[in-house]
Amino acid sequence: MYERRRLTPLCTLLLAFLIGLLAMMDAHAFFNSKVRAEDEIGGSVRALIHGKSAYFPTLKSDISAQIEGDLATVTVVQTFLNPSDQVLNATYLFPLNKDAAVSFMMMETGDERITAVIKKKSVARATYEKAKSEGKAAALLSQHRPNMFTQELANLMPGQLVVITLKYSMAVPRIDGAYELVMPMVVGPRFVPQPKPVPQTVSNGETQGPAQKSGQWSFGKLPAYPMVGGLTIPDTIEKDRVSLHIDLKSAVTLKGIKSATHKLAITGGDHQKSIDLAAGRTIDNKDFVLRYELSGRSVEAGLLSHHDERGHFFSLLVEPPNAPLEKDITPREMVFVLDTSGSMTGLPMDASKTFMRHAIASLRSKDYFRIIRFSDNTGEFAARPVQATTLNKMAGLRYVNSLSAGGGTQIPKAIEHAFSIAAEPRTLRIVTFLTDGYIGNEARVLQLINEKIGDARIYAFGVGSSVNRYLLSEMGLAGRGFARFIDPTEDVNKVAIELARRLEAPLLTDIKINWGDLKVTDATPQIIPDLFKGDSLRIMARSMDELKPGSTHTITISGYVSGRKADMPVSFTVPQKLDSDRFNALPLVWARSTIADQMRVLNTSRSYRRKAGRNAQFKQAVTKLGLDFSLMTQWTSFVAVSEKIVNEAPKDSVDANVPLNRVKGVANEAYGQKTPASGQQVPLPNRLQKAQMRQTPRVAMLNSLVQGVATSGFSGSSAPEPATNTAMLLLLMMMGAGWMWSNRRKA
C-alpha cells in the first residue's frame, strides 16, 4: 500500500502530461489540415495584437521579364487572399526597381477585370475612398519613393482572390563590364531622424551636426512599416511567395549569365535564354540580381530610336575609352565614410570592415585618406588627411577594426563632416560611403550633396541584401560617381576585392552631346555623369520634328580623358519604314528619366540649382508627364474600381497590412529592437517581470516552458493557435488536479 501511494501522484502527472500532449498534437493536425484546405495561396498568418486576435492578408507574387538587349519590360502579378471570416482593407508595402517606369495596372476580382486609370494622386485617393465606403472592390497604387510603393485593396472579402497585374519598363544598365538587372523583393526598414533645435555634444567630445533646416521641399511621409515575420508577428509567412521567369534575347551572342543572389535554371541557345529560379519559388527577403554579357555589338548598339504620335525618341549608348597609363593617374584624397548605426549590426558591419581592409591596402603612396564613422554622431580616424604610408594604413586598419554598430542613421551629419575641411591640394577628392541607406530623409541628403560636392566625387557602396538602391544611386549620380552593392550574405571577401579595385578616378569626364541637325528639345539626364571602366550610360532625347526616311545624321560625343579632349562621332540613319512597335518602351523610359531629372532639381536647394523655377512648376511638370505617359510618379496614382458592390457593410471592414519577411542578414536593431548578446536573457516586459517575481517554484518551472512566447515581443502563432491554447489549458488543469490530489493524500 505504501508503494502504491508513492507512485500514484507520479503516474497521475505522467498520464495528465501524455493526455495533454496527445490533445495538442491532434488539435494541431486538425487545424493545420483545415487551413491548408482553405488557403493554398500564402498560408494563414494569425496573431494576438494588444490581446485581440488578428488575421493578415496573404500574398503571392509572380514576376516575368522580357529583355531585348538592354531594354526590359517586366510584369508583376500580385495575388491577394483574405483567409479570415472578416472583410479586410489590405495594404501591401513593396519595392520595384528605382528606374521602373510603371505604366499599367489591372485588377481582377470575381468575374470582373478592371484596367486601372492614372489620375492625380489626390483624385485617385478620393476615388478609392469613395469606392471603399460604397462597399466596392477597389485598388490604389501609390508611389512613396521611386523604389517604394503601396498597393491598397478595399473590401477584400473572406476567401476571395484579388489579382493585381503591374507592368513597367526600364533600361538595364551596364556595370563593371556586364548588364545588371535588379529586382528588389522587400522594403527594408527606414530611419527618419527627428530635427533638433541645437547641436549636441556627446561624452567623447564629438559634436553632432546642426538641426535640420526648415523650409525644405517635402515629398510626403513614409507609409507605416508593416508587421515583420519572426520579429513582430509569428514566423509563419510562406517561404515561397515569389516566382520569377525571364526571357532574354539579343541580336548578338549572350554569355556570362549568372546570379550571385539566387540559383538559376537556364535553357536556350546563343541568342535567346529562358531563365527561372532553380527552386521554382523563393522567399522575398533579399534582392534578385541578374548579370549577363553581350559578346559584341549589333548595328543598333550605339543608337536606338522609336517614333509615334508623341514624337521621335532616341537612346544613345555611351561607353568610356581605355584606361589611362599609371603615370597619368591623379593622386586621390580618399574619404571613407562608414555607417556604424544599429542597422549595420552583424553581417553588414563585418562586410564593411572586409571592404575597408582591401580598400586601404589598394591605396597608392601618393594618395591621402580619411576615415569617418557615423551613427547618431560622427567621429574620425585623424584630424586631417594623412598620406597613405605603410604605418598610416596600418593605423587606419586598427581604427576600422575597433568600430562597432549602434544608434541611428544620421547621413546628413556624415556629409557635413566629410566636407567640413578643404581637400588636400593637387588631389581628386573621392568620398566613399558605406551604408545600407535605411533612412526616410533622402531629400535632405541629396540637397546636402548638391551644396557641398564642389569638384569631388561620391562613390556610394550599399551594404546589405536589400538596401535603399534609390538613395545610393542618386548619391552617386549627384556626386558624379557611381553606386555599387555588397551583399553580406554572399562571398564578401571576393566582392570586396573586386569593389576595392573600382576606387579609381573616372575615365571620361565632362561629357557633352552635340545632336547635330537633329532638333532635340528634351535630352535626359540633364546632368551627364562621368564614366568609369566597364560602365556605360544611355542618354535619352525626344524630337518633335519629322525625320525624312533614309536621311543620315551625325551625333558627336565629347569629353576629357586625363585632362585631354576626346571626341567620338555616332552616325544614325532613319529607317525607310518606321516601326511603331520596335523599341516601344523607349518613350516610357525617356519620360521616366525626365521625371527623375525634375525630382533631382527639387532635391537641390534653390541657390544651387542649375535650372531656375519654383517648386510648384517642377511638380506640375512631373504630374503632366505622369498623366501624358500613364506613369506612376510622386503625384500620380493608378486606381481601379469594380462595378459591383461586394460588401454590404463596409463600415465593419478591418484594416490590415500584408506582413513582410525580415531582410536577410539584417539585425533586430534595424527594426528598432535589441539583439541580445550570446547567452544573454531577453528582458521580460514589466508586467511579466512583476508576475514572475510572485511565482512559486513550481509555477516558475512551468512558466519557463512557455517563456519564449511571452518574451518574443508579440503573442500569437499560425492558425492552430486556438487548439494549442485549449490543449495547454487542459494540460494545466489535469496537472493541477493531480498536484492537489497528491497533497491531500500526504495530508
Image: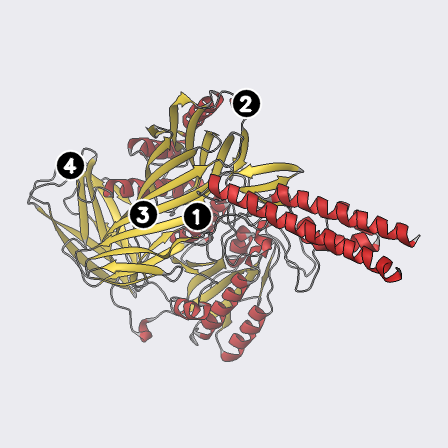
**Is the C-beta separation of discs 4 and 1 under 8 Å?**
no
Identify the disc placed on residue 241: 1
Characterize the local packing of mark 1: few (<14), some (14-19) or many (20 or more) Cα atoms within 10 angstroms. Answer: many
Count of numbered circles on the image:
4
Looking at marks 3 and 2 on the same chain, the residue that comes earlier in the sequence is marked by 3
Looking at marks 3 and 4 on the same chain, the residue that comes earlier in the sequence is marked by 3
Front-most of residues 68 and 39: 39
**Is the C-beta separation of discs 4 and 2 under 8 Å?**
no
What residue type is disc 1 on? Arg
Quarter holding residue 328: bottom left
Quarter holding residue 491: bottom left
Q: Which residue is mark 2?
A: 651
Task: Give the SS element for disc 1.
Answer: loop
Looking at marks 3 and 1 on the same chain, the residue that comes earlier in the sequence is marked by 3
Residue 19 % position (x, y) = 69, 50
Quarter holding residue 301: bottom left
Q: Which residue is mark 3?
A: 64
**Is the C-beta separation of discs 3 and 4 under 8 Å?**
no
**Is the C-beta separation of discs 3 and 1 under 8 Å?**
no
Characterize the local packing of mark 4: few (<14), some (14-19) or many (20 or more) Cα atoms within 10 angstroms. Answer: few
**Is the C-beta separation of discs 3 and 2 under 8 Å?**
no
Task: Give the SS element for disc 2.
Answer: helix
Label 3 or label 1, whichever lies nearer to me, is 1
